[in-house]
Each structure stands twice: as C-alpha cells, then as structure tokens.
Amino acid sequence: MKLGRSFLATAAALALAAGVAQTPAVAKEKVTVAFIGPLSGGVAANGLGGRNSADLAVKLRNQDENAKYEYELLTLDDECKPNVGVQVATRAAANRDVVAGVTHYCSAVAMGTVDTYNKFGLPVVVWGAVLPDITYANDYPEVHRVNGTMINQNQVAAEFMTDQGYETWVVIHDTTDYGQGHKKYFTESLEKNGGEVLATFGVTADQQDFTAELTQAKSLNPDVIYFGGLTPIGVRIRSQMDKLGIDAQFEGTSGIVSDAYIEGLGELAEGTVAFIEGAPIEKLPGGQYFKEQYDKANYNEPPEAYGAFAFAAMNLVLDKIEEVGPDRRKVRDALNKVEGRDSIVGEITFDDHGQNAVALITKFVVQDGKWVVWEDSEYASGERKLNGM
Amino acid sequence: MDLALLGQYVINGLMLGMMYALVAVGFTLFFGVLDVIKFSHGDVLMVGAFTGYTTFLGLEAAGVHMPVIQIVLLVIASTVLVGLLGAAIAKYLILPLTNAPALNILLATMMLGTVLREAVRLFFPEGSNPKRFPRLLPDTVIPIGGFDLRVDSLMLLIAGVLVIVAIHTVINRTKLGLAIRAVAQDAETARIMGINFELVVLVTFAIGSAAAAVAGVMNGLYYNEINFGMGLLLGVIGFAAAIVGGLGNIYGAILGGFLFAALQTIGAVALPFASAYKDVFAFAVIISIMAWRPTGLIPEKVSERV
Amino acid sequence: MENTQPATAGRQDPTALPIGILAIAGMTVFAAVFLMAESEAAVGGLLAFAAVAVLGAGKLGLLERVRAAFRDHELTMHTAIVIGALAIAWVFREDHFALLMLTMAMLYLTACLGLNVQLGYTGILNFAGSSFLGVGCYTAAVLTQHTAIPPLVILPLGGLMATIVGSVLILPVLRTRGHYAAVVTIAFAVLFKTFLEVNDSLGGPQGLAVGEMTLFGWGFNSNIEIGDFYASFYMNYFLLALVITILAFALTRRIERSWVGLNMDAVRIDELAASCFGINLARWKITAFMLGNFMIGTAGALLGMILGFIAPTNFTFADSLILLSIVLLGGMGSVWGIALASAIIVMLPEKLQLIQEYRFLLFAALVILVLRFRPNGLLPRADRIYFPGWRPR
C-alpha cells in the first residue's frame, strides 16, 4: 500500500510540475507506449527497477517542450510466467492505442510472447531477457533487443574463470529456457577452454531444499559451482552450500545480478562472480546522467542491473515515434533501421534479426555488499582472493 | 556410496522429516478435536517465520545482540503471536463453519492461506524478496569419520524432538490433554461433562499453530532464508503426511512426515532418474499408499454410526 | 422433494414469461456495461447496483416469477439466454479482450460442469481439476504441432486423454473417502505440475505453443473481415465455445433429470443406503469421475488453442482451487449457479486488474466471505422435481 501510494504521489507531483511548465503550449496528441516486466514474484526487484527506468524515460520526454506528443505509459505485470506474459502481451497488443512496447526481463516469458507481437504487429524492444532464440529463432520484424544474448556472456564467463585457474565445475540450472540456455552455452564454452563439468543438475523454480543435489555436488568436490538461474534460487543455493560446508567458488549469471541477491545473503554473497552483457553503465557518460535523473525522481526501488537497458529501450522507442509518428508499422520499420545510435548503454545497432550487436561483457564480483566491476575490485588487484585460489 | 555421504543424506532427510512432522502434528491435532482440516497451516508456518524475523530485526534495533537471548525471545514471540493467530482463525472462521460441509472448511482455509501469503507479500516491506534469516546457532562442526556433523543441525533436531515430546505429554499427561481427548472422542458428551468446548478447541488450535511457528523458525535457522511462498508446499506435504500416517494420531503424523522426507531423499539420490523427479516420485508413492491403505498407515478408529 | 407443485402451480402465472425475458435482457445489458466499465469506481458501482437490484427484485417477488419462467418455459428462456450471449458478442465484436474474457468464462463453465458431475451429483472430490484441464491443453499442443489430425477431432481427444490419465486415480478415489480422498487428488495436482516442469519432452517449465483451431480450412486465428464487416478472431472461438458449452449444459441437464442422475444423487447423499437399494457404488463413481474428466479435458483442449501458449504454471493446485470455488460459489449441483459463478470468477479478477497487485488477496477474501455467509452458494440447487411438466389438474 505504502509503495503504491508514494509512487503515485511522485508521479502526480511530476505530472503537476510538467503540467505547470507546459500550460501555455497547445495540448499535444496523446500516445500510449507499454512496459511489460515482472512486477510481482521472486524477480520483482528487477522488474520494478525496469519499470521505474522506463517511466523515467517517459517523464523526461514529457517535460521536453520540443516533444511532439504527450506520452502515457501502460504498465503490465508478466509475473515472470510465460502464460501470464502471453495474456498481458495480448492485452497490450490488442489495445490499438498502444504504439510500441518495451518488454520482458524473463527469457521464458519473452519466448512465449514474440509470436503474439508478430500476430498483432506491435513493435517491441526487449530490455532484459538474454536467451538468443528470442531474436534469432524467428524472423519477426516486430522484435528487437537492446541487451546482448547469453552466448557472449557465457563465452566470457568460461574464458575468465578458466583463466583464474579453475578446472572443474558442477552446473546447476533452473529448468526454464533461461536456465537450460545458460547450461548449454556455458558447457559448450567451457569445453573449448579446457574446463570440465563433473555433473549437471536441473532444479525447479519453487524448490526450497537443495541439500540432496548439493550433497551430491559436494562429493564430487568441484572447484566452482555454476548456477544458471534467477535470484531467488540463487540465494537458496548459495546459502545451502554454506550449510553443507561446500567451499567451492560460486559463479552466477546475469539473473542474479541484483541488490536482492546481496540482501538475501549478507556476508555470504561476498566473492560471488556473475556477468552482464553491456558496458559498465556507471562509467559511460550517459550512465552518469541516467543515475542522476533516477536519483532525482526519488523512486522507491533501485534501477537494478537492467534498469539502464529499459531506459535506453524506451528512449529509442520514443525517438522513433517522434521521427515517424505514432504508427505501429512505421515505428517498426524505423526501429529495424537503427544503426550506430548513441544511447546510455553504448551504441545501438540492430542486425537483421533486430538484435543489438553488443560485444562488451562486464564481469561483476560482490565486494563488501556491492556488485563491483571486476577490474575495479580488490579481487582483481590481488588484495582478496576468490574461493579455492 | 561411501559412509560420509550416506551420513549427510541421513541428516538432510531427518531435518526435512522433522519439519514435515511438526506441520503434520498440527493437522492431526485440529482434525482430532474438530474433524476439520485447516489448510492454511503451511502459511501459518510462514507467518511464524516472518514473526521471528521481525522480532530479530526489532531486537537488533533495540541493541540486544546476544544470540542466546535473541533466539529465546524470537521463539517466544513467534509461538505466542502465531498461537493467537491460530486461535483467532479457529474462533472466527472455523467454528462458525463447523455445521457447513467439510469441503467448505477445507476451501475456506485454503483461501485463508492465500490471504496470509498475499498479505505478507504485499504489506511486509519488500515482502516479495527472499529475506535473510539470521544465523543464531553456533556453526561449529563435529567431524565423525569423513563426515561433518553440524552442531546447529543437531540442535534443531533435538529442539524438534522436544516440541513433539512436549505436545505428546500435554495431550496424554495433563488435565488439559484429557479435555482435548474427551472433545476429540465425543464433543457432545464432553460438553455434558462440563468441558468448555470452545476453549478446548481454541487452545488446541493455538498449540498446533505454535508448533507450526516453531517449524517456521527452524526452517529459517536451517536454510537462513525465508520467503512468502515457503509455506505453500510445506502445507501440502504436511497434510499429505498427516493423512498417510492416519489422521487423529500423533504417531501417524510423525511417521508420515519422516516417510515423506525419506521418499524425497531416496527419489533424489538413489533412483535412476534425474533428481528433479523426486517430488513426482514421492507424491506417486503417496497416492499408491492411499490406494493400498485408504485410511492411512495407522488407521483412525472409527465407529460408523448408521 | 415435497415441492411437487402446490395448489397454485396448477395455473401458470401469465406474467412469468415476460418478466423472465425482461430479466435476461436486463442481465445482458448489465453484462455489456460491466465489460465496458474501465475505472474502479465504475466497476464497484456496477457491483453495488447488481446487489441492490437482485435484493430489490427478491423483495418484489420478481425472482420467484423468473424461477417460474425457467420452470414452465424452459426452451424459450434458454433460447433467450443464447440470444443474449450472442448480442453481447455482437456489441464487442471488435474488442479482442472482451471476447477473450467471455470465451474463457464459457470454457471454465464447461470444465466446472464436469466437476459438478463429480462433486455436485456424485460427491467425488476432485482437487486436480486444473490438471485435467492441463491434460487437454497439452494434448492439443502436441497434436496440433506434430500431427495432421483435424483440430475439431482434437477436442474430444483432449477429453479422452484426460479420462485415460484420470483412470490412474480410479482405484484410490474409489477406496478413500472424505479428507483421505482429498489428499489423493491434491497429491496428483502437485505431482502433475512438477512432472510437467521437469519433463523436457513436453516443453518443461517453458511451456509449449499450441496450434490454432481450423474448421473447413478456416483458420480461427484470423480476424473476420468480409467487406466492411470486421470482427476479432476471438469471435471464432467465442462461437465454438458457445456450441461446446451448450452441449455440455444439455448433457448435464439430461443426466441430472435421468435415472443416471438419480443414482448419482443417491450415491452422494448416503452410500450405505444407496448400496442397500442395490445401487452399484463403484459403477456410478467411475462413470461420474470419467465423464467429468472428459468434459474438463475437452474444455482444456479448446482453451489451449485459444491461449496459444501453455506452461505448467497454468495448471497449479491454486488453479484447481479456483475451479472448485466456482462450483461451491455457484452452489453444488446447480448448473445456473455455476454459470453465474464462472462469469464472476473469470471476469472479476480481470476487472480488478486495475488494482493489479491486490487482486488475489481480494479474490480469496471474497470467497471466504461467501463461504461464511452463504454456504450453499449463490444459487443453491433446487429440489428435484420428479415429473417436469406434470401438474395436478
């Protein structure tokens, strides 16, 4: 209750401020854009961060007097469940007022919804889901993505970890497409780099007790436990590893890079490594601007790792609507032509599948209760050491 | 399989079984006195864990940092509050419904579980995120051969046994227990004999719910993580355990709890399919047992009134 | 059962039919306005209006006449309701979402009628309703994607599959009673969802895409455009679902009024007495359980095609509870009550989506309140009339 009300209050205050500033101008045509992400459930923190960031992009645009339209944001909750995702995607896409969307953090959901967007002709930009198939397993001109795919992420992850001197792994993954994908690409990359996977375990999303799997893992005595999945299970596995006295290094994927992971574990999170596709945002000039604006808007939740992508995606969509007008087909074609466009997450160029070519992968490690870029950490400088090194 | 590994599995299984048994004992107590199933029991457990967590945060804020004091206060707060919650549920939801079909109570309490779960998710600060439950028990390890026995697991097991023994003693050795058993056997006659029926029911629900609160806190101390959805599956498993053991019988509940944990552990490690199938395996066995022994392993004594 | 027409029933009330038709017209208009309502205030206001209207009509004795109209002019009233449903569909012909809601409500109704045969007539508890719905959906997914079987045939195949899967449970269901029976189906519901999640060959937790319905070469996923006329593609599904619902409804009605229904009622009310009169308990329990699952599975197959994408999270234990709540809220054994409850339970949460996060909480609280204060459901089943149409002269 508290959360909702204060959010509304900020929104109202901003709207009021914008309204006062704009009173003299002629009323602008209203255009609706959609944001879809997981606003409830285990990964809600990431979804809310993305929502706030997209919301920020819309608000900043509405304050801009040169903008041709007044934008309204339709926010929908996909609960990180494919079936719910398809329902809300249908809702957004069937609504003729909605011109374009910034959609999905969860890969499993995005995989289900791309057909819907194609069927209804709604152009969307994916802001967080990392499974390659979302853009590459179809030829839908409606689907684009600003963040990179998990292939690059796992190549870097495998190379980086073998370079540190680790040799054996136990892979645990959730059984969604997200977890399966990570398992597949990581195992492939690891083989190329000479690492060995001793065992692989699939776990379900609402599992609470992992001691049986971890006891088996312990008996294999791996150097690293790799987990392909999202924050809630990540927290449980890391915590139960400690219970069973497993002192292997814990390595995660982009799915656990969230403040909720650290809050859920406290000191145990220390030394966890994970990877995100994209440049370290704080270091880009646009990233500074984003952070300042985000802080100024006083949201209740932090933007989390993918907030900047949601912001960039929404900005891109708004730019295109400004350029070609609020028409789904025109916006779609304009998005397909994006090349070398500057954004706060670096340059955006969509290939013929609508995938942004992101070469850069950022490595993160938890240090003193924060996700720190590897190169800046005391682990890289040798002051601290990862487990087993 | 080497012995150390086996030992580890046994400890894992015992811990799981203890938590299931504590939940199942609650189900069986409620059924005993009122012939009803209170399905919100798993979510009551979750409320217990969150109460404990909140107490801990309060104590930290108040400057109390001694783990021993913290743990005692936390268990007291959690059992008392959740006991009251259990009594309130009995008074305002279950007793008024006792004349309705049994299915209505089952459904009403299932919905109540949803209400509790959603309420914690929505109204607890950042309730949808997993919460870090503090480590208050010593994390020393006793090496036995190649296998490390953790002291905290051992303490939790002993605590669980104590709770069950305490409940058993209350029921079989005290005047209150006599009243509970009288109500369970024949509510009408018990009333005529001057037993305050409603009070007995409320106290029974308070005891059962407090046991769930202990299980919730144990769960938190063991996994060091709690979340709003933790009670759902625990409730279903506890119910299945109580039924398989035989309703209205405390030994049945304990048997059922440990049986289910054993099935899960065996399903995860000893069978030739992927460990993720362990729940499928455990529930399939439960269904077969029900086909074989339709009134549970230790059947309830029923006198069919015609 | 003593309700076999007291003295007044000899004369038919001439005002009954017009009032009955008016009531249906009123409900049609109300449903249309409700579907259009956007704001929370409007939805709340409409609900309050409905409550007042029903109470008022009860006070004026109008409800009694409506009931009489249903009793004496059954065919006319039923036709009027179908016309009403078609009228609503016509109003919303371009609105994808409203049509989807209506179609879902009808499919839930079909599934719940299946549950009603099990629970309402025969007294078999089934906490795995959504699992059998899931069997239908997954059958549709596999068959549309991998075979060339005509989709219309897939619908009964979905039902058949649900029956076959359900037959695993027959032995424990027959042997257990009460809470012990509950645990069998609850365990099955949890088992089924977990199995789908860990079994890769059926898509795992990711789920599966389901192919569209086609009839005589007409793909149901295409919008209807004939000249200037445009209608959402959900109109196709709406019409098909309407046909299926009418069939399911007629079937349940026939069963209820036949000696089959009589036997089932006897089994539910008192097993011991029933078997004393030579009723074969096992036969009727098996019949009811399998027939119910067949209806649920058939509804599931079409549901899968409409959703276009299904995942194990569609078929959780909580979803089974929703199906059961519909039957209980409507009133066990009362087909019209279940129809009303399906409409409420499918539409209301969607309308409450405006207050998104709180909808499950409110929904659960609402069910508790109804169970507490109206334990026999919204429209309790009327006493059996043994000779419909028969009146003392």
Image: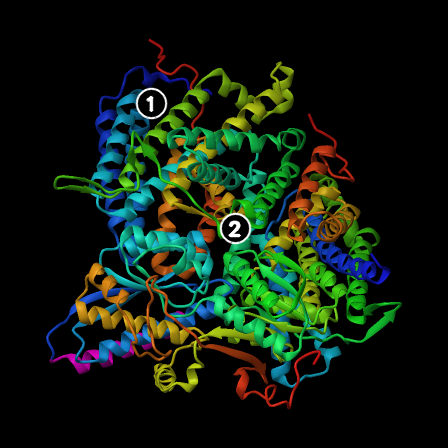
> Extreme right residue here?
B145
Crowding at label 1, few (<14), some or many (≥20) Cα neighbours within 10 Å? some
Q: Amino acid at mark 1?
A: Arg
The part of the chain drawn in magenta is: A4-24
Q: Which mark is residue A133?
A: none
| Chain ID of residue with mark 2 | B
Residue count near mark 2 (Cα–Cα under 10 Å), binned few <14, some 14–19, many ≥20: many
Asked if residue C8 is positioned above or below residue A316 in the image, the reply reads above
State the residue in front, C45 or A314. Answer: A314
Q: Is residue A259 left or right of residue B47?
A: left
Quadrant in the picture for residue B65: bottom right
Percent from the top left, x then y, of residue A103?
Answer: 36, 63
The question of residue A21 being in magenta is answered with: yes
Q: Nearer the viewer, mark 2 or mark 1?
A: 2
Q: How was the colour assigned to the protein in this rendering? A: rainbow
User: Magenta residues: mostly which secondary structure?
Assistant: helix
Q: Chain of mark 1?
A: C
Give the distance between the C-alpha atoms of the residues marked 2 and 1, in whole angstroms. 35 Å
Question: Which disc is residue B111 wearing?
Answer: 2
The reply to whether residue B32 is in sight is no
Q: Is residue C36 above or below residue A254?
A: above
Horizontal relation, residue C218 to residue C390: left or right: left
Residue A16 in the image, given as x and y percentages of width and height: 24, 78
| Residue type, label 2 | Met
Where residue B255 appears, as percent x and y from the top left, is 78, 48
Q: Which residue is under mark 1?
A: C71
**Residue C205 on the magenta span:** no
Please indicate whether residue A196 sits to the left or right of residue C227 in the image: right
Label 2: element kind: helix
- For this rendering, which residue is in front, B276 or B181? B276
